[in-house]
Image: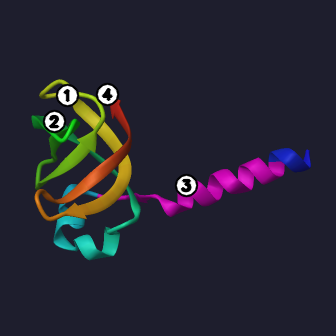
Amino acid sequence: MMKKVIILLISLLLIAGCTNSSIKKINDNPEKYLGKEVIIDGQINNRFMKSSEWYISVVDPESYILVQSKFDLEKNSNVTVTGILSYDKSVGYFIKSREVRVK
């Protein structure tokens, strides 16, 4: 029983650490989200490979952001992305994905 309670508490803490946000909110104030886990919803409208990593452009009705992924994903797919907002001078702000779910 105690083990279940501990697992539940850890799960709640992990969920509380995630920030579910719109792409526009992240782009409007990236410093607030930098280094934090974020969750976004959007559609893939472009993709390219750089240094053996895929970068996918995810758009919502107001904005777009790059997502670094280990996998190529089909253009026009609707996705939910969970990852850490990061910065690289060659691509700017991007989400280093932990999970990309195709809807």
Point out the residue furthest to the right here.
1
Q: Earlier in the sequence, mark 3 or mark 2?
A: 3
Q: Residue at x 13, y 28 (%)?
A: 76
**Rounded to the nearest whole Å, what is the CA distance between mark 3 and mark 2?**
25 Å
Image side of residue 8 versus residue 34, left or right: right
In the rendered view of the protein, which quadrant contains the N terminus? top right
* Residue type highlighted by circle 2: Ile
Q: Quadrant of residue 99?
A: top left
The 10 Å Cα crowd at callout 3, few under 14, some 14 to 19, many 20 or more, is few
Please give the label number shown on residue 77: 1
The 10 Å Cα crowd at callout 4, few under 14, some 14 to 19, many 20 or more, is few
Q: Earlier in the sequence, mark 2 or mark 4?
A: 2
- The location of residue 58, given as percent across then percent down, is 17, 43
At mark 3, the secondary structure is: helix
* Residue type highlighted by circle 1: Ser
- On screen, residue 58 above or below 87: above
- The location of residue 60, given as percent across then percent down, is 16, 47
User: Pointer 3: what residue?
Assistant: 15
Image side of residue 42 versus residue 14, left or right: left
- The location of residue 80, given as percent across then percent down, is 32, 40
- The location of residue 7, given as percent across then percent down, is 75, 48
Q: Earlier in the sequence, mark 2 or mark 1?
A: 2
Is the Cβ of the residue at disc 3 closer than 8 Å to that at disc 2? Answer: no
**Rounded to the nearest whole Å, what is the CA distance between mark 2 and mark 4?**
12 Å
User: Pointer 2: what residue?
Assistant: 44
User: Pointer 4: what residue?
Assistant: 103
Is the Cβ of the residue at disc 2 closer than 8 Å to that at disc 1? Answer: yes
At mark 1, the secondary structure is: loop
Q: Quadrant of residue 97?
A: top left
